Amino acid sequence: MTEETNGLETKVENMTTKNLEEDVVNPWEVASSSDKGVDYDKLIKRFGSSKVDEELIKRIENVTGKPAHHFLKRGVFFSQRDMHQILNLVEQKKPFYLYTGRGPSSEAMHLGHLIPFIFTKWLQEAFDVPLVVQLTDDEKFLWKDLTLEEANRLSFENAKDIIALGFDVEKTFIFSDLEYITQSPAFYRNMLRTQKLVTYNQVKGIFGFDDSTCIGKISFPSIQAAPSFSSSFPQIFNNKTNIPCLIPCAIDQDPYFRMTRDVAPRLGYSKPALMHSTFFPALQGAQTKMSASDPNSSIFLTDTDKQIKTKINKYAFSGGGTTVEEHKEKGGNCDVDVSYQYLTFFLEDDNRLEEIRKTYTSGELLTGYLKKELIEILQKIVGEHRQRRSQLTDDIVKQFMTPRKLKFDY
């Protein structure tokens, strides 16, 4: 992109946030008036990103030599910026790295929080690249009713959930903003460079800040931008400033990185590439994303088998008929049925998923049996995760969170 089009990425959202009839999608709120949830095709147009199409999926398979992750095939990761440029780098045997993050606002993460990390792990293994994970405990202090100490403690707890997915300590650096920024002059310098290039008017337009917004919130986007630049991690990249990054994240985080992509060329850095995921629906339906503050809106990684069963049976919105007779006559609606939607994320067998879709849509498969299959899958996933997490010591977590050189040479 040219310098002139850099601003366009920001301007797209400046205009759309004023349209109150659109789905609300920003880093702090996601809402839709449709039973099907956010219209992602419209969102791509609003945000000015590109669709993850069959051509890109096939190219990823060709470059990695691996079958595409089911999140790609099923449209969970549906939008992207400059992913073809990342694949060009790989073909040219040039390096890139991965960057994603988590805002630690609760003791335990829920299933929706896992989606970017599951895909990030696949990307890391498929491309064999380093990963940095930012824990924005400073953000949660600014936006939530949390002390600095509690926000920092939650970042350490959430790091355990991330590590329990099986990330390689030799390839992965997880950091708390509250800790790393004080240790890294290079990171702080990139924050300052970014702050100098973004005006108050711009952040008002991008993020909806107003005159009553505290100055900490106004400056925070520069902190989320800094990990996009390899020079923020001199210990990993040997002080090189030209190594591009790819950011897998939920689409609500895109405003941060539109701003970052506008700033990057003026700093002499590469624009970060992105891959955006859809939202994991709340148990009550797809109109909003799940909330860590509502224990009944989601399945948490600390939930017992009994709690998972109760939540799915009691709260999971059904697309089936109100009676067995009506369901058999009219069939179920997979587009709004939360249990089916959850299976699209966590049932990896494509043939079984298609069989469930057909039999539920025809009315042959009843809601109770659909929920039963989901319960068994989630109990296994959460149970295994809980077991791996229980084996993590504080020393293991500290290894991941210690600034250090990773196994890659630059």
Image: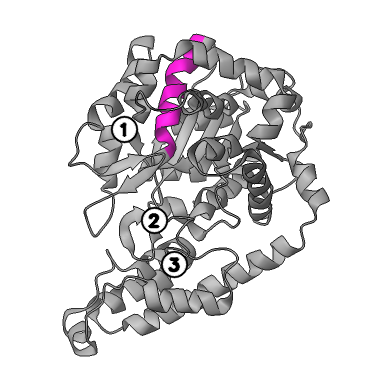
Residue 203 drawn at (x, y percent)? 39, 22
Sequence-wise first label, 1 or 2: 1
Q: Give SS at disc 1.
A: helix
Label 1 to label 3: alpha-carbon separation: 31 Å
Residue 125 visible somewhere in the drawing: yes
Which residue is at a point 48% across and 30% down the rendered structure image?
Answer: 273
Residue 17 drawn at (x, y percent)? 26, 32
Marks 1 and 3: which is nearer the front? 3
Q: Residue type at mark 1?
A: Phe
Q: Which residue is mark 3?
A: 296
- Image mark for residue 74: 2
The magenta region covers 253-266
Residue nearest the viewer, comparing 69 with 196: 196
Residue 247 drawn at (x, y percent)? 52, 36
Residue nearest the viewer, comparing 65 with 115: 115
Quadrant in which the C terminus appears: top right
Q: Residue type at mark 2?
A: Arg
Residue 369 falls left or right of residue 37: right
Marks 1 and 2: which is nearer the front? 1
Q: Give SS at disc 2.
A: loop
Q: Residue type at mark 3?
A: Asn
Residue 251 drawn at (x, y percent)? 40, 41
- Colour basis: one colour
Marks 3 and 2: which is nearer the front? 3
Q: Which residue is mark 1?
A: 47
Label 3 to label 2: alpha-carbon separation: 26 Å
Which residue is at a point 76% across and 32% down the rendered structure image?
Answer: 403
